[in-house]
Image (cartoon, rainbow, N blue to C red):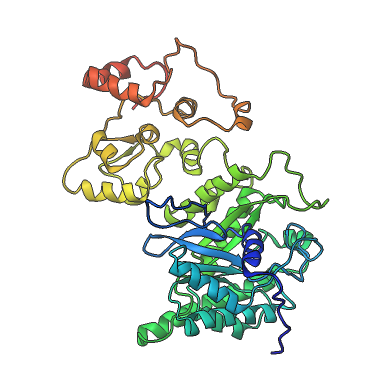
């Protein structure tokens, strides 16, 4: 294909400053880095420009150079800082400049890999060709064997995407906005069809590659770490139920490794964008990640967590705790008999602790001290479980009672939420006055088993277990 000359008048470090900053709104990696110098007594330094962290398949946290190839773009998406109509500093790397940066940072132990995205320069094919040439040089000329995450450009030639996929570890195609209507409003140059087409191509080629590897172990690997995507949250009026339903569909239809949620940051003054007087919806983003975790690892479905009648996640409780409070008929759960899938639905019990419970109870029945050693968060779980048919201390299986106690021992709420709590304030003389977890445990230890019996007899009108 015919190439236009990439301008090189800016120093490489100036380009790095511009293009690492321009990449910060792409959250398909986890966190941003920090800068920390060496005082001469220790070993190593930390360099912040463009360094982010992700997790390898074996669970290691790895540092990645996170940059755009270019922040030039032919699109004019209303929410994007790099849209064509914005007057911002522009820069474009050459493939060799990126290769030299990666190798230089790698030799200094700043990074273990590369996260490479890009605006669309000239055309999707032209941009995808540049990304391919960069990865080809890194792998074949510079012999870089580290982790590489690259973006597939919607609308690019499928042959270019396939060639690039054999050089990358992970590939992603950003969904941008949850619905096709949102794209029409804020990113008219992009369509759901254009975005899903390369996503489907990557999925199909990954499946073919798995079959090839089953027959020939020496076959080249295509996107071995899978594919991911990103959705911007809060720029358009979709509910949490709509967003989670879209994510669930993507996991099922495209075998995605991860859906990333990015709280909308208003970087452009545009009448089509929400005002966000309270700033980016970070709490909403956090709750969506928690719900996403339940879809991926805990066996929940979007329709169990939310519905058309109840379309948004609870700001006061995490999604699993909120589900449990609305399904108290499922509780209490007997720790020594419940199935693994049932244990996963108990607030305070995670995947690892559920696995440990299943293994440990083969050797004998478990009690609350055992659960604490296993890693169960008892201050949440104690309202929903029994051990050998008994609770840790007398509790009512009532929504109001559990809600008050969970809010009492919970970390402090954000200031903007403190005025929204409408639950009844308890008096010092209320029988249901919650104790701290330390007080509860100390009281139980001091008074022994008699407390359980006496408390159950004097518990009042609520249902005790």
- Residue visible at 61% across and 57% down in the picture: 24
Q: Up-down: is 329 above or below 211?
A: above
Q: Quadrant of the C terminus?
A: top left
Q: Quadrant of the N terminus?
A: bottom right
Q: Up-down: is 289 above or below 6?
A: above
What is the x, y in percent for residue 112?
44, 66
* Residue that extends furthest to the left in the rendered view of this protein: 363
What is the x, y in percent for residue 228?
54, 65
Identify which residue, 40 or 147, lies in the foreground.
Answer: 40
Q: Up-down: is 403 above or below 110?
A: above
Q: Quarter-wise, where is residue 80 in the image?
A: bottom right
Horizontal placement of 361 versus 116: left or right? left
What is the x, y in percent for residue 385?
34, 36
Identify which residue, 148 or 354, lies in the foreground.
Answer: 148
What is the x, y in percent for residue 120?
71, 72
- Residue visible at 70% across and 67% down in the picture: 71
Number of residue marks: 0
Look at the image and tell me whether residue 213 can be seen: yes
């Amino acid at each position: 294909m015919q190439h236009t000359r990439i301008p090189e008048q800016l120093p490489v470090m100036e380009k790095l400053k511009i293009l690492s900053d321009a990449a910060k709104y792409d959250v398909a990696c986890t966190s941003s880095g920090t800068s920390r110098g060496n005082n001469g007594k220790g070993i190593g330094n930390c360099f912040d420009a463009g360094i982010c962290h992700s997790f390898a398949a074996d669970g290691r946290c790895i540092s990645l150079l996170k940059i755009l190839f270019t922040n030039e773009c032919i699109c004019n998406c209303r929410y994007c800082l790099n849209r064509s109509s914005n007057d911002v500093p522009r820069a474009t790397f050459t493939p060799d400049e990126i290769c030299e940066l990666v190798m230089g940072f790698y030799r200094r132990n700043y990074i273990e890999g590369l996260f490479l995205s890009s605006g669309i320069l000239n055309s999707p094919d032209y941009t995808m060709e540049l990304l391919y040439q960069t990865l080809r040089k890194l792998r074949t000329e510079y012999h870089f064997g580290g982790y590489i995450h690259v973006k597939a450009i919607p609308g690019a030639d499928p042959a270019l995407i396939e060639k690039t996929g054999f050089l990358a570890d992970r590939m992603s195609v950003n969904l941008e906005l949850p619905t096709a209507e949102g794209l029409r409003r804020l990113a008219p140059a992009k369509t759901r069809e254009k975005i899903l087409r390369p996503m489907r191509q990557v999925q199909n080629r990954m499946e073919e590659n798995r079959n090839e590897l089953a027959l020939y172990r020496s076959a080249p690997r295509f996107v071995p770490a899978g594919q991911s995507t990103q959705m911007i949250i809060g720029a358009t009026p979709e509910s949490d139920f709509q967003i989670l339903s879209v994510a669930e569909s993507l996991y099922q239809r495209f075998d995605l490794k991860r859906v990333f949620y990015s709280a909308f940051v208003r970087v452009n003054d545009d009448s089509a964008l929400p005002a966000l007087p309270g700033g980016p919806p970070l709490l909403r983003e956090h709750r969506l990640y928690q719900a996403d975790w339940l879809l991926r690892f805990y066996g929940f479905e979007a329709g169990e967590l939310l519905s058309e009648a109840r379309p948004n996640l609870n700001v006061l409780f995490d999604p699993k705790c909120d589900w449990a409070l609305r399904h108290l008929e499922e509780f209490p759960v007997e720790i020594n008999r419940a199935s693994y899938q049932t244990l996963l639905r108990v607030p305070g019990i995670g995947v690892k602790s559920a696995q440990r419970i299943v293994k440990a109870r083969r050797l004998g029945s478990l009690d609350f001290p055992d659960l604490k050693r296993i890693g169960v968060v008892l201050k949440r779980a104690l309202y929903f479980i029994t051990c050998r048919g008994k609770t840790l201390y007398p509790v009512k299986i009532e929504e109001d009672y559990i809600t008050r106690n969970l809010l009492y021992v919970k970390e402090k709420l954000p200031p903007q939420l403190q005025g929204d709590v409408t639950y009844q304030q308890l008096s010092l003389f209320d029988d249901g006055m919650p104790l701290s977890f330390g007080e509860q445990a100390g009281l139980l230890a001091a008074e022994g088993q008699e407390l359980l019996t006496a408390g159950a007899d004097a518990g009042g009108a609520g249902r005790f277990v």
